[in-house]
C-alpha cells in the first residue's frame, strides 16, 4: 500500500489553482435541525484536470484543525452545522467535478450514475485514484493557503464518504487525528465483495470484458480493508441495523482489522443514508478525544 499512497501524493502534486466563488447560493445543511455554517465555494483545478468544487467554512479561530468531509456516491456538496466552526475549519469537497455550485453536472453521468466505481473496475477514465488525488490537492491547498492547521486533520463521511474517510485518514498518516466513518462503502471491494462489485459494474456497460485479478488490483486503492494497517488514529465506525447497501457485517470486518483506538456503533432501525444520529454520536466522541 505504501506504493499506492506515494503514487496518490505524486498524482496530486501537479499544481492546483483555486478560485473563490462569492456569488453562488450556499448549499443546504446536511442535517436539517442545525444552523448551517457560513462559507464560500472554492473552485479547484489541478493541472490538466477538470475543475472540482468544495464548500469551505472558516473556524471561529482560523488556526483550528481541518474537518474534511467526503461525499456519498451522489457526490452532493452540503454545508455542515455552524457549531462545528467553534472547533474546526470545515471543508466539504466533491471530487472529479461531478457536483458544482449549480448542482450535478449531468453530462458526466454514465447510464444515470457517476462512473468512478465503474471506471476503477474496468481501468478506464477517471478512477478512485483520481478522486483521492483531488481531495489530497484540496486539503493541502487549504492547509497551505489559509490559517487552518493543515497538520491536524479529521475525516468525516457517510457511505462512499465513510469509506473514503478511512482511506484518506490512512493516506495522510500522522496528520490525521481522528476518523468518523458512517456506514462506510467500498469495504472488501477488492476481495470478499469482488464478484458483487463486478456484477454491479458490468450493468453499466455493454459486453464488458474484464480480468478479475486486474480489477481487484485496481480496487485496492479504494478498499478500506487494504488501508486498515495504516490507520493509527482513533476511528469511530457507524452502521445501520437495516442498511442493505453497506451491511453491518462488512463494517464489523474492518473494525476487527483495525489495531488503533476504535469505537463501533450499530444504530437500531436505521437504513442507509445520512443521519443526524451519527452526527450527534460523532460530536460526543470527538469531545472525548479533546478535539471539540
Image (cartoon, rainbow, N blue to C red):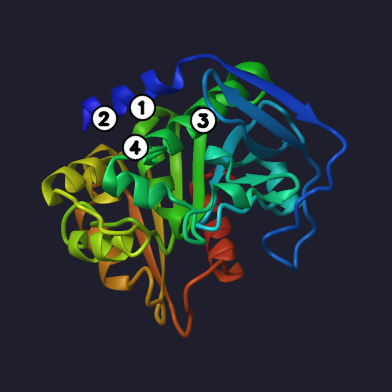
| Marks 2/1: CA–CA distance | 6 Å
- Tag 4 and tag 1, C-beta contact below 8 Å: no
| Marks 3/4: CA–CA distance | 13 Å
Relative placement, left or right, of 122 versus 240 is left
| Marks 3/1: CA–CA distance | 19 Å
Image spot of residue 131 (x, y percent): 45, 38
Which one is earlier in the sequence, the residue at label 2 or at label 4? Answer: 2
Q: Up-down: is 89 above or below 208?
A: above
The residue tagged 2 is: 4
Secondary structure under badge 4? Answer: helix
Compare residues 117 and 170 and report the one nearer the observer. 117
Relative placement, left or right, of 172 versus 35 is left
Crowding around mark 4 (Cα neighbors within 10 Å: few <14, some 14 to 19, many 20+) is many
Query: Given this view, does label 4 or label 1 mark the residue nearer the observer?
Result: 1
Compare residues 243 and 235 and report the one nearer the observer. 243
Image spot of residue 273 (x, y percent): 52, 69
- Tag 3 and tag 4, C-beta contact below 8 Å: no
Query: Given this view, does label 3 or label 2 mark the residue nearer the observer?
Result: 2
- Tag 2 and tag 1, C-beta contact below 8 Å: yes
Q: Up-down: is 81 above or below 253?
A: above
Which one is earlier in the sequence, the residue at label 3 or at label 4? Answer: 3
Crowding around mark 3 (Cα neighbors within 10 Å: few <14, some 14 to 19, many 20+) is some
- Tag 3 and tag 2, C-beta contact below 8 Å: no
- Tag 3 and tag 1, C-beta contact below 8 Å: no
Secondary structure under badge 3? Answer: strand
Q: Which mark is residue 8?
A: 1
Q: Quadrant of residue 123?
A: top left
The residue tagged 3 is: 152
The residue tagged 4 is: 170
Image spot of residue 267 (x, y percent): 45, 76
Amino acid at each position: 500500500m505504501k506504493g499506492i499512497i506515494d503514487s496518490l501524493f505524486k498524482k496530486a502534486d501537479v499544481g492546483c489553482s483555486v478560485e473563490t466563488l462569492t456569488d453562488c447560493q450556499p448549499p443546504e445543511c446536511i442535517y436539517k435541525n442545525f444552523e448551517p455554517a457560513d462559507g464560500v465555494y472554492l473552485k479547484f483545478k489541478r493541472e490538466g484536470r477538470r475543475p472540482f468544487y468544495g464548500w469551505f467554512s472558516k473556524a471561529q479561530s482560523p488556526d483550528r484543525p481541518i474537518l474534511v468531509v467526503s461525499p456519498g456516491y451522489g457526490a452532493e456538496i452540503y454545508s455542515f452545522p455552524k457549531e462545528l466552526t467553534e472547533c474546526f475549519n470545515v471543508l466539504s469537497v466533491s471530487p472529479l467535478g461531478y457536483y458544482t455550485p449549480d448542482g450535478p453536472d449531468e453530462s458526466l453521468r454514465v447510464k444515470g450514475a457517476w462512473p468512478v466505481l465503474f471506471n476503477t473496475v474496468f481501468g478506464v477514465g477517471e478512477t478512485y485514484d483520481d478522486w483521492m488525488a483531488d481531495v489530497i490537492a484540496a486539503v493541502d491547498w487549504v492547509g497551505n493557503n489559509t490559517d487552518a492547521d493543515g497538520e491536524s486533520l479529521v475525516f468525516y463521511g457517510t457511505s462512499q464518504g465513510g469509506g473514503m474517510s478511512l482511506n484518506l485518514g490512512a493516506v495522510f498518516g500522522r496528520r490525521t487525528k481522528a476518523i468518523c466513518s458512517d456506514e462506510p462503502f467500498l469495504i472488501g471491494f477488492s476481495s470478499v465483495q469482488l464478484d458483487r462489485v463486478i456484477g454491479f459494474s458490468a450493468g453499466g456497460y455493454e459486453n464488458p470484458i474484464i480480468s478479475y485479478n486486474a480489477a481487484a488490483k485496481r480496487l485496492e486503492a479504494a478498499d478500506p480493508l487494504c488501508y486498515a494497517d495504516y490507520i493509527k488514529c482513533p476511528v469511530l465506525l457507524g452502521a445501520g441495523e437495516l442498511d442493505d447497501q453497506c451491511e453491518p457485517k462488512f463494517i464489523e470486518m474492518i473494525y476487527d482489522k483495525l489495531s488503533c483506538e476504535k469505537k463501533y456503533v450499530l444504530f437500531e432501525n436505521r437504513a442507509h443514508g445520512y443521519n443526524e444520529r451519527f452526527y450527534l454520536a460523532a460530536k460526543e466522541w470527538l469531545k472525548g478525544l479533546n478535539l471539540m
